[in-house]
Amino acid sequence: MRYLKLLATYLKVNLKSLAVYDLDFYFALAGMIIQNLLNILALRFIFNIVPRIKGYSFAQLLLTCALATLAFAIFRCFFINALNISDYIHDGRLDTILIKPVNPLFQLVNERVDEDAWGDLIVALLLLIIVDMQLHNPWYITVMFIFISLFTSLIFLGLAVLGNIVALLSSGLANLAETTFDFFDMSKYPLAIYSSALRLIMTFILPIGWVASIPQEKIAVEHEWIWLLLIPGACVFFFIVIYQLWRVFLQKYQSTGS
């Protein structure tokens, strides 16, 4: 209950900070919407040359892209500050976080939101609805995808935290958290287009295949409803494993001022 109240307070403060620069927020929102539309047009251009990729039609590939974008937009809307942990370490601000009687990762994640990400979120939701209609998926499939995306965003959070473990060990001098953007780009395409070795890694080690490709295949195509439990369970399990690693290395952290 205490953390729910803190979360509500953080959200209120962050939303107020966005309202202060309302014009910038709207420009950023419009910019992200335009960028996403241009990405879709570029994909359409590719499909004018190659009608199917590994058996996937344009609409099916758009669905994978929409699911990945939705999960990543949720990550950016609420967890984006996980990418900046190395800055906290490098300039000593992590020390002030650690002395507070609140979970350090909770504080770090909630201190900032990304105003640009709301454009991604809007485009992803609209794209998901439109593509599901084109593929004649019933409305409840769309609802299931939105539900699952709340959990698959934890995969990106886990990858960001995993990248910041390196920052803990190097006192903020090295940072692999930004590779989360590269993982997002890889998650926008079906697992089938990758080599068998990469598919193995993307399924069981760095599970970005669970963000979009697996939900699309198991729910939209095969209608195996057990995956409504398996996918959220896998996402939560991955994040818990990374969080435990984070706690271990956080205990070994030495202040930059020591």
Image (spheres, rainbow, N blue to C red):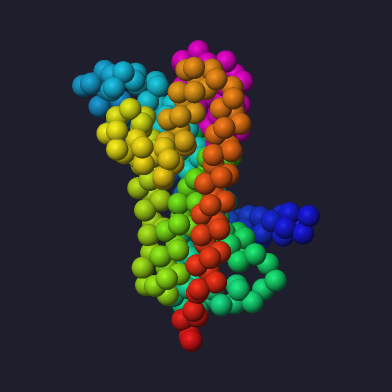
Q: Position of residue 258 (x, y in %)?
A: 48, 86
Q: Which region of the structure is painted magenta?
A: 125-149
Residue nearest the observer in this picture, 140 or 204: 204
- Determine the residue positioned at 59% across, 22% down: 225
* 148 falls in the magenta region: yes
**Majority SS type along the magenta span:** helix
Residue nearest the observer in this picture, 175 or 226: 226
Quadrant, the N terminus: bottom right
- Determine the residue positioned at 59% across, 28% down: 228
Eyeballing the image, is 60 above or below 150?
Answer: above
- Determine the residue positioned at 50% across, 67% down: 249
Eyeballing the image, is 95 above or below 18?
Answer: below
* 143 falls in the magenta region: yes
Considering every residue shown, the one lying at the far bottom of the view is 258
Q: In this figure, what is the number of numbered marks?
A: 0
Would residue 236 appear left or right of 258 to someone viewing this image?
Answer: right
Considering every residue shown, the one lying at the far right of the view is 1
Would residue 170 appear left or right of 150 to someone viewing this image?
Answer: left
Eyeballing the image, is 120 above or below 93?
Answer: above
Considering every residue shown, the one lying at the far top of the view is 136
Residue nearest the observer in this picture, 60 or 255: 255
Q: Position of residue 87 (x, y in %)?
A: 45, 70
- Determine the residue positioned at 36% across, 29% down: 190
Residue nearest the observer in this picture, 42 or 90: 90
- Whether residue 105 appears in this view of the structure is yes
Q: Position of residue 129 (x, y in %)?
A: 53, 24
- Whether residue 123 appears in this view of the structure is no
Q: Position of residue 208 (x, y in %)?
A: 42, 40
